[in-house]
Image (cartoon, grey):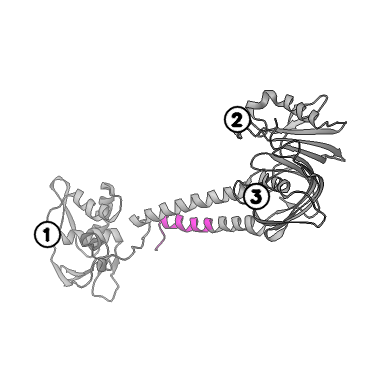
Amino acid sequence: MKTLGWGRRLFAVSIILLLVSLFITVKQNIIRRDDILNCSTKAIMHFEDTVTESVNVHIHFNFNAKGKGSIVVEGYSDSEAGWLYLQRYVQFDYNSKRVSPSARYYQINRWVSSKSSIDQSPDVIFDYFMREMSDSHDGLQLAMEKINADTVLLSSINSPLFICALKPGSQLE
Amino acid sequence: MKYKINAFLIYDATEGSLKLDDGGKSDSQLTITANALLFFMIQHPGVISRDTVMLRVWEDNGLMSSNSNLNQYLSILRKAFRRYGIENVIVTVARGRLEINPELALEVIDDSLLHPVIHASEQGSPAEVAPEPELVGADPTGNDRYWGYAGAMISLLAIALIGWSWSNNGSLTPLVFTPVAQEPIEVLSTDAMINPRMRENYLKNFIAVKEKKNIKYDKDERFLFFYGDKLQSNGLGRTFLTHCAKHQDNTFSYCDNYFYYSWK
């Protein structure tokens, strides 16, 4: 009776194993993308001139399905121009990936911001705010770490930035 | 290639078969290695050393040779020929050398086909490459070893992939905070946030930031503090302090996040 040798049998088993592992990987990383993140926080941030350049804002992060997201920033900016209302809306495309058992990175590749008609704050202050989330290139990057079921910590590549309270609709692992 | 042995036994080297002209009743099928050994001995009449046989029949075809292997296949061939009344198809001569029995009458009756194993190693012509040998029983082939190596590599890759998927599976592990101070103020940090170089000044800097912002605190409130190392961040020293109040079971329910681009 003709039979396969051990090498061919091992090869056949390894192909099956590889197919199973690919299926598991695709299922977990593409089909089940539990990365929808909606949260809000309050921040008082001081920039280059820590006395005269600051914002005191509420921030709403929305990393929605299909790689689309938005940030709403509302509050006041302080600068040489004075204490002025700030209300900006940022739209972006993002992708996310799990980088460790405790962290997921949200990489924002393209973003555009718009200001409301009652926003008189200087653009440079808002740019400071956005650039604090820079990935050191053209994009933005936030690392998300879970604190508990209702709260996450968002950090830039340089520093923790916000403890953010999750809102309904978030689908974290 | 076909031979007629002793004018009655047909040896087909391509098929590895021994036949009588009796309608297939007495046909025998040799294993690939036994066939290769017989064909080699027929092709090389005269005394030949065991080492040469092992080299040409086993090693040159990617197989592991051994004296016991050779003895086993010599025994198989002798037994196969004994069935047709031919004793000692391959004889052992002095000093353990071998020879196709010189008393055999060998007649080539068809030289059109090439032997699948021997010619591949002897001539190496693309047109004469042997077909993929099929294994008979536990008979090993050299190619099988390479299939095994490839299988092992793919298995390792698959296991690594499963491990990676597994590590990325399930819930995010919650952050573990380290209490830096507990009375009267509860100050937390994580191992990643506390730079060993800054550890000594950690509380002092925390108090400086808290007082600069004139932050008051109450029961069930806590702080999380990060102070960047200026030596490692171009002198910027980013500073983060968050002041959180408890609500129901969530001790981080309401947080004010304070950030300094450069703490001076």
For the residue labelled by badge 2, is the local secondary structure a helix, a strand or a loop? helix
- Does residue A153 appear in the picture of this structure? yes
Split into 4 quadrants, where in the image is the N terminus of chain A?
bottom left
Q: Secondary structure at mark 1?
A: loop
Viewer-nearest of labels 1 and 2?
2
Closest to the camera, between mark 3 and mark 1, is 3
**Residue pointed to by mark 1:** B102
The disc placed on residue A140 is 3
Disc 1 marks a residue whose amino acid type is Pro
Q: Which residues are magenta?
A: A2-18
Q: Residues within 10 Å of mark 1 (few under 14, many from 20)?
A: few
Labels 3, 1: one chain: no
Mark 2 sits on what residue? B231
Q: Residue at x 13, y 66 (%)?
A: B105
Check disc 3 and give the amino acid type: Leu
Please state if B44 lies on the left or on the right of B145 as rendered.
Answer: left
Chain assignment, label 1 = B
Estimate the x, y position of residue B67 in percent, counting from the top left: 25, 47
